[in-house]
Image (tube, rainbow, N blue to C red):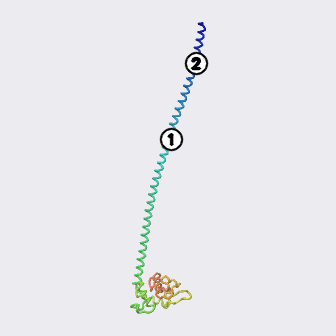
Amino acid sequence: MNRLWGRVGVRATSVGLLLTGVAGGVYLGHGKDVQQQAAEAQLVVQSDESEMQLLKARENEHAAARAYRRQAETDAAAKAAAEAKAAASRARMLEAKLIAKKEAARKAAEAAEAAKRQSSTSSSSPYSGPIPSSCADYSGNRKIGCALMLDAGFKIDQFPCLDKLWAKESGWNQYASNASTGAYGIPQALPGDKMATVADDWRTNPATQIKWGLGYIEGRYGTPCSAWSHSESTGWY
């Protein structure tokens, strides 16, 4: 009986130990799983932290790049504005110089014209004949021509030259026409319709023709006596 109980006790002890070992093994196995899961979770946390740090670093890089671009754009805009301002200033200076140059040329031309007119009106006449005392010495188209010549700024001593010039060209006839050349009127304008710049009645009005002829003489020769001198040497004026 004692032997039986001894065997049962041994077996029970063995079973208990076996169960204990199995339980212990299960517990140990479970513990290993927990440890592995904890380790994996730790790795995930560490990975997330690394990714967060990487993202923050990239965000910082992007922010720095944006700031650099903004600064570069600001600097470029400021430089462009400065260059545009300088260019505008140079343009204004050049324009002012050009205006001053044109104004100086205009004044010089006016001074030369005034000197020319003064010379033409004050110079001695190359005409050696008698000088009329006034336009009252003439009549008809010659009297009109004398008055208009004085009105144009020439002196009375120029009229004998003008008288000879247009007496040669047309005989002071406002209807004089050159069939071979087409010249017309007292000054023998070629073509005749040039005198329309003075008035539309250029075909019949001696005053219109004389005004145009005086303007032509002044612009081309300066004085009636210079025009007469040229006509004497060349046969035309």
- Mark 2 / mark 1, whichever is N-terminal: 2
Estimate the x, y position of residue 149 in percent, counting from the top left: 43, 86
Question: For the residue labelled by badge 1, is the local secondary structure a helix, a strand or a loop?
Answer: helix
Label 1 environment density (alpha carbons within 10 Å; few <14, some 14–19, many ≥20): few
Residue contact at pointers 2 and 1, CB within 8 angstroms: no
- Kindly identify which numbered label has been placed on residue 205: none
Q: Residue at x 48, y 48 (%)?
A: 66
Q: Residue at x 43, y 74 (%)?
A: 106
Q: Amino acid at mark 1?
A: Leu
Residue 59 in the image: above or below residue 220: above
Q: Amino acid at mark 2?
A: Leu
Residue position for label 2 = 19
Residue 234 visible in the snapshot: no
Residue position for label 1 = 55
Q: Residue at x 52, y 36 (%)?
A: 48
Question: For the residue labelled by badge 2, is the local secondary structure a helix, a strand or a loop?
Answer: helix
Estimate the x, y position of residue 125 in percent, counting from the top left: 42, 87
